[in-house]
Amino acid sequence: MTPQLVVRRAVWKGKSVDVLVADGRIVEVLPWRKDQSFEAAWVVDAQGLLLFPSLVDCHVHLREPGFEYKEDLASGLAAAASGGFGQVMPMANTSPVNDSAATTRFILDQARAAWPHGPMARPIGALTKGLAGQELSVMAELAEAGCVAFSNDGKPVENTELFRRAVEYAWDLGLKVIDHCEDPYMAPGAGVNEGAVSSRLGLPAQPDVAEALHVARDILLAQYLDIPIHVAHVSCRKSVELLAWAKKRGVPITAETCPHYLLFTEDLVEGYNTLAKVNPPLRTRDDVLAMRQALRTGVVDALATDHAPHAAHEKETEFEDAPCGITGLDTALCSTWALVGQGELSADDFLRAWTSAPASIFDLPVCAFDPGDPADFFLFDPKARWVVGPETLRSKSKNTPLLGAEMTGRVTAHFLGGINVL
């Protein structure tokens, strides 16, 4: 087969390679040779840039419909494209809530209209009607319309019997439930960890046990039902220890964490910094070290941004009144790749957490550069430097504690189905 696209001299796992693409699929990956030539419609010389498969983000908030002033599908997918993400899974807390097939189809139509070649939106359907936690949503209709998972993210389901039935029903449909683990009575959404910092600032705070209690519930349910459950945005050592216990016993539980739980501690909230207000809250240095170790060992399977855009005026207020959330699609790649450079993660850890693990958990296509794989990959300049600011972020909202920070590394081209979308 004559390739339609050839990307030459890219570096994949430390070796220079040529990537051959036809009909949106990988044809072959060959060792690069200077004297090798190809007849192709398009030849791109990567000039030694790093080659990565497109990343998969299994937890984002893209705000459309209903909150387009924060983010819309066009701007959110723009941030995804420039951040190296080929697939993102938007949560259901839109307005209206994504608890109907019509809303799911609207999200998919808007995404395709804005980015016809991708990145792809893979919607997550509401677990309960209106996310109210009282009645199951029309899960079969949501699955048929294109939802790839279900979640009540942001509003944990406190009724364990209802949650159990949801997990069983989702599994009958071939899909999984993503659970936001938070005790709804222990300072829900406080946005700051209960400890020395919250005491000094005089803020109502949430202890790590509020998360761990519901992680334990999900582990016991998954074990009892023998049905997989996925735990969202794990943030603390207590949760990690429970997950390690479960995995040693073969419990079908998977988990994700976010870059901010690998990078930042509760100290960032000092000065009532609303840009560091997130749910679950930033924890202690010990928790950060536990999260890194859990990712290295596979106790935590995947990374996800929990990209949560808010308008500037919503964050520029008293700490207790500000919404929780940090944007991450623009910065996650660089900030987590930096951990590889520091020896905190291996390149294999990074790739697993951002590609093969979330794709496997949610049954999504991913590029492993094998023949027939989707030609979804990007070129990355690991030496490019840029400053995080309004002019460099593609997301409509800029609520990240990294504002003003210098980042190293930039996506220079992003191919989805063999088409450069940047």
Image (cartoon, rainbow, N blue to C red):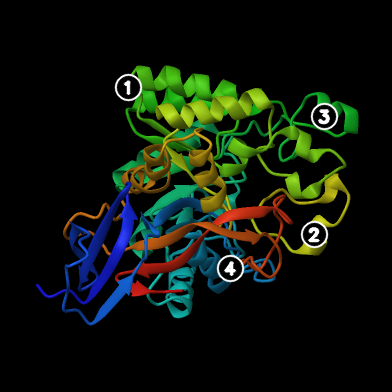
Query: Up-down: is 367 above or below 199?
Result: below
The residue positioned 51% from the left and 32% from the top of the image is 344
Residue type for callout 3: Val
Q: Are marks 4 and 1 in contact (CB under 8 Å)?
A: no
Residue at far front of view: 35
- What residue did someone put label 3 on? 197
- Whole-Å distance between the Cαs marked 2 and 3? 23 Å
Q: Give the mark nearest the N terminus, 4 or 1.
A: 4
- Whole-Å distance between the Cαs marked 3 and 1? 37 Å
Looking at this view, is 405 or 349 the one in front? 405
- Give the structural element (helix, strand or loop) at label 3: helix
Q: Give the mark nearest the N terminus, 3 or 1.
A: 3
- What residue did someone put label 1 on? 250
Position of residue 141 measured from the top left corner of the image (x, y, whole percent): 38, 60
Residue type for callout 1: Gly
- What residue did someone put label 2 on? 314
Query: Up-down: is 102 above or below 316?
Result: below
